[in-house]
Image (cartoon, grey):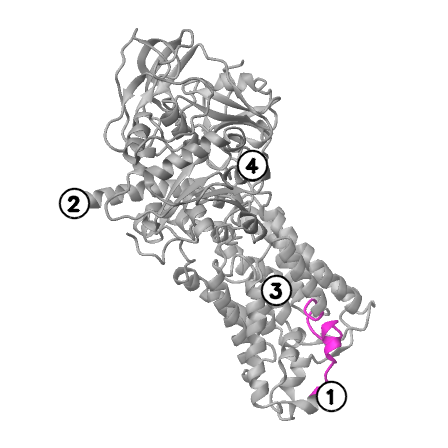
Amino acid sequence: MKRAYRMNMLKTFTKGGVHPPENKLSGNKPIEKLGLPKQVSIPIAQHIGAPSTPVVNKKDKVKAGDIIAKSQGFVSSNIHASVSGTVSKVGEVMDTSGFRKPAVIINVEDDEWNDSIDTSSDIIRNISYSSQEIVDKILEAGIVGMGGATFPSHVKLSVPEGKKIDTLVINGVECEPYLTSDHRVMLERTEEMLIGVKLIKKALGVDRVLIGIERNKPDAVDHITNFVSEEEGMEVYPLKVKYPQGGEKQLIKALLDREVPSGGLPLDVGVVVHNVGTALAVYEALQKNKPLIERVVTVTGKSLSKPSNFMVRIGTPVKDLIEAAGGLPEDTGKIVSGGPMMGKALNSLDVPVVKGTSGILVIPEREAHRAEEFNCIRCGKCVDVCPMGLEPYLLKQLARLERYEECEENAIMDCMECGSCSFTCPARVPLLDYIRFGKTNVSQLIRNRKQK
Amino acid sequence: MDNNKVLTVSPSPHVYENISVRKLMYGVVVALIPALGWSVISFGIGAIIVTLVSVLSCIAFEYLIQKFLLKQKPTVTDGSALVTGLLLAFNVPSNLPVGIIIIGALVAIGMGKMSFGGLGTNPFNPALVGRVFLLISFPVQMTSWPEPKGFGTNYIDAQTGATPLGILQEEGDVAVPQLMDKMPQYSDLFYGQMGGSLGEMAAFALIIGFIILLYLRVISWHIPVSTVLSVGVFTGILWLADPTQYADPLFHILSGGLLLGAIFMATDYVTSPMTNKAKWIYGIGIGVLTVIIRVFGSYPEGVSFAILIMNAFVPILNRYIKPDRFGKEVQHG
């Protein structure tokens, strides 16, 4: 049955999409444990939603896994100490956004773990939790979407009244060029990750799990297919390589041919999507009692001497990762947190790794700058590649003219900022810059309207 | 580690596709080479003179207007003036006097393009603006068609003859099947062995150009296919209704400037619509208008006019024909 699927035409999403060079330089590099840093800076807002409130003070002693900031409200997340040591400051650090944000700074001493955590490498297969217990534990362990969006995972598992979920989709697409952290998790932590999937499946009470992996990772496809061949209701689908297939709306379209309505969520079409990294974190939270305090980060770039995949404690400064990957190349022009399509350029090497950091990309000077902008020649390529069926050239124009009502009418809020339009524009018009500007103003417009 | 390294910070994306306006324009130039080559072989020195004059004057006018009139940084190297120059040359007879070509180039670039603000802002295809201006201002010179006699040194003094569409128009009283005896064979039409504008006659060379454009991903297939298809269907209906009065669809597709227009003129980025749906409507509009002008109008050929008329509809098409939005069909909740 599963083999038969592989003979079929490969699935993919239908609208738009682009093919940036894949450059998966670190695809065959096993995950290495990165040494402990001297100091970690753990921002207390690492997720979408309300920032957490610190529950530790200066000079407090903490162990790895101790809670240091408590979730505030439903859409929020707990934060745990990723190392043992002394809290040196509850202050501010510059995070990925380039702004100073509240954080807990810990001086590392030894490597002691909270006693309740099982630090052995034994795989615990038996699932002894009820679905509510699973959700509670995920909340407690501070798990957020690890594909980069960092949406608190327990929220996605708490299905509102009246919604029926029939399928769990596991996102192993990793469509961003360069990044390989999910790829390595799928290869090296396969069984644990799949136990995590089963836990999520149980929490949701669904019978069907679809695992989508782009076919540029044939080893991961084969490996996981072997593992799930005995499992009831789990199917692996290799997908045609096309960016942004890892976007959850695109992945659902590719796998199930369902379209999440504009402004809606996957659960509106009976689906919940979780990333493979998240599934691994769920396994560790439930079976090992280990909160989300470390993650796999790809450190990569054309000039880097040793592109790698590291298991990194949250709060480790980016410079430690780059040092371990061979040091900062002489020709470095830009450092990006995440992939080249949606990642954020960093303005400092002291920025800490957070729960959503999937990769650190070092871009050489020659590729760090944008080319000169020309007049729009109205070639329509941006319209062709937009996976949401929008008209980037028009939204850019409207945003520039501050005609926000028209931006809204033309569905600007459907834009997920995948960057395909700017990527493909032959005139190098910074379409997405203008669209982001338009989105900010349209959200303001919507908020004002709601207040009236 | 050097912590004082100056890092570039810019919003995503951080990588770009390896295409540019310049590359796309030179893609069009490459795709025009087969037809240009065939034209030189067929019309001789005249084709070379007309093309060179047209290209050089288009580039010169764009440069001069940007530099001295608009006081902008000249952008002639983007290749668009080169394309306009080539297409203007393709749309005129190969015995057109130099002075007239220069006037055509001035109108194409000055009026058709720069007066609207240059590349990307002109509503009408510049080469066609130039061509139609010349057709109306110099009707005699613009409709004396040299015959393709193979490579020679004749220019103004080239031997001229009627175009197939011209014959059809002139001798409207004679039944079409009898006229067909005077016409070139389909294979001649396909290989461009008939009178016509410099670059419009050789169907095979234009189709090679189409394949090049598709291969280089300069254009999509929608506009050429919808245009040619609608000419085929419309003339097919007429022909089936009365074969004695109307020429068959293949004749209409292979003669005149239809292929040149459909492949190279109608697909001009700036003056064609954005979405594939709108491209279909635009292409069908060009096809239908072409047939109406050819069959019922007083001009033997109507592709230029049809494209210019549909150019005028492009803003409306862009406004009302939206792409299918993702998730629009489904109701929220």
**Mark 4 lies on residue:** A223
Q: How far apart are marks 4 and 2 (CA)?
A: 55 Å
Q: Is B283 in front, or is B315?
A: B283
Q: Identify the mark at residue A452; answer none if there is no mark.
A: 2
Closest to the camera, between mark 4 and mark 2, is 4
- Which mark is first along the chain, 1 or 3? 1
Task: Measuring from the top left, give residue B62's x and y in whole percent.
Answer: 59, 52
Let me know if residue A240 is in the magenta part.
no
Q: Which chain carries label 3?
A: B
**Mark 3 lies on residue:** B263
**In the image, are marks 3 and 2 on the same chain?**
no
**Mark 1 lies on residue:** B181
- Tell me the kind of residue under disc 3: Ile
In this orientation, does residue A401 appear?
Answer: no
Give the overall secondary structure of the magenta segment.
Answer: loop
- Tell me the kind of residue under disc 2: Lys
Q: Distance between the residues labelled 2 and 1?
A: 78 Å
Determine which quarter of the picture holds residue B19.
top right
- Tell me the kind of residue under disc 4: His
Determine which quarter of the picture holds residue B206.
bottom right
